[in-house]
Image (cartoon, rainbow, N blue to C red):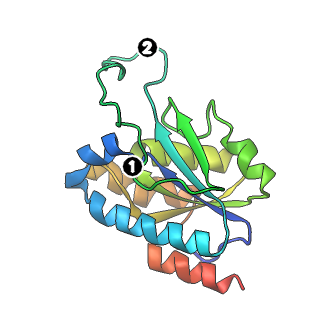
């Protein structure tokens, strides 16, 4: 569903916009995603709305057929591309989604947040997992469709057209900023 409104108490969540991940997402249009994310950050800061910057610092424990990420990562791999400012919420995670095993829900509830706008990388992994958990936690969910990217174009498209409309609303950066302006 196309974005129709943003609550007065909306937070922006940007997932995994960090040096290591954005470096490997160059072919997925990451430059435009970062430019749109910067516009959203500026709009949320201007309105003194919460901003959540999420990074991933390793893989979740448990069985997997893929090698675990760990000691072979560059020292700055988890460094955020959009630096946190005083008052921003930073979340480091070891799973796909930003809610599991973190204080994100408590931080949002403490601030009275009722809706989240989500962007980041990868659309079908970190962003989708975070959106699903936000929905399950009772937040109104909106995806910034031009502030997400995925290395797999088929998975990206599937998340945008099949999954996200079931979880909430979707809209581009300009549309979401206009909705922020309409909140009064």
Residue lying farthest to the front in this orientation: 86
Location of residue 157 in the rendering, given as x and y in whole percent from the top left corner: 34, 57
**Residue 104 versus residue 100: which sits nearer the camera?**
104
Q: Is residue 16 visible?
A: yes
Location of residue 149 in the rendering, given as x and y in whole percent from the top left corner: 34, 55
* Neighbourhood count class around disc 2 (C-alpha, 10 Å): few under 14, some 14–19, many 20 upward: few
**Residue 87 versus residue 178: which sits nearer the camera?**
87
Residue lying farthest to the left in this orientation: 27
Q: Which mark is residue 63?
A: 2
Residue shown at the point (30%, 30%) measured from the top left? 74
Q: Tell which tag, 1 or 2, sits nearer the viewer.
A: 1
Q: Which of marks 1 and 2 is nearer the N terminus?
A: 2
Q: Whole-Å distance between the Cαs marked 1 and 2?
A: 23 Å
Residue shown at the point (41%, 63%) measured from the top left? 147
Q: Can residue 171 be seen in this view?
A: no
Q: Is residue 84 above or below residue 61?
A: below
- The quadrant holding residue 34 is bottom left
* Secondary element at tag 2: loop
Q: Are marks 1 and 2 in contact (CB under 8 Å)?
A: no
Q: Which mark is residue 121?
A: 1
């Amino acid at each position: 569903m196309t974005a129709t409104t943003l609550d007065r108490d909306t937070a922006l969540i940007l997932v995994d916009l960090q040096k290591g991940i954005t470096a490997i997402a160059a072919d997925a249009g990451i430059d435009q995603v970062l430019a749109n994310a910067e516009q959203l950050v500026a709009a949320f800061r201007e309105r003194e709305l919460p901003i959540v910057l999420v990074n991933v610092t390793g893989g979740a424990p448990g069985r997997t057929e893929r090698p675990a990420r760990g000691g072979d990562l560059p020292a700055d791999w988890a460094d955020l591309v959009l630096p946190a400012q005083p008052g921003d919420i930073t979340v480091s995670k070891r799973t796909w989604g930003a809610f599991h095993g973190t204080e994100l829900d408590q931080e949002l509830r403490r601030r009275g947040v009722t809706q989240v706008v989500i962007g980041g990388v990868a659309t079908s992994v970190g962003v989708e997992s975070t959106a699903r958990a936000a929905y399950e936690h009772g937040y109104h969910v909106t995806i910034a469709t031009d502030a997400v990217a995925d290395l797999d174009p088929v998975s990206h498209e599937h998340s945008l057209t099949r999954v996200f409309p079931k979880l909430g609303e979707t809209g581009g950066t300009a549309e979401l900023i206009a909705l922020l302006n309409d909140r009064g």
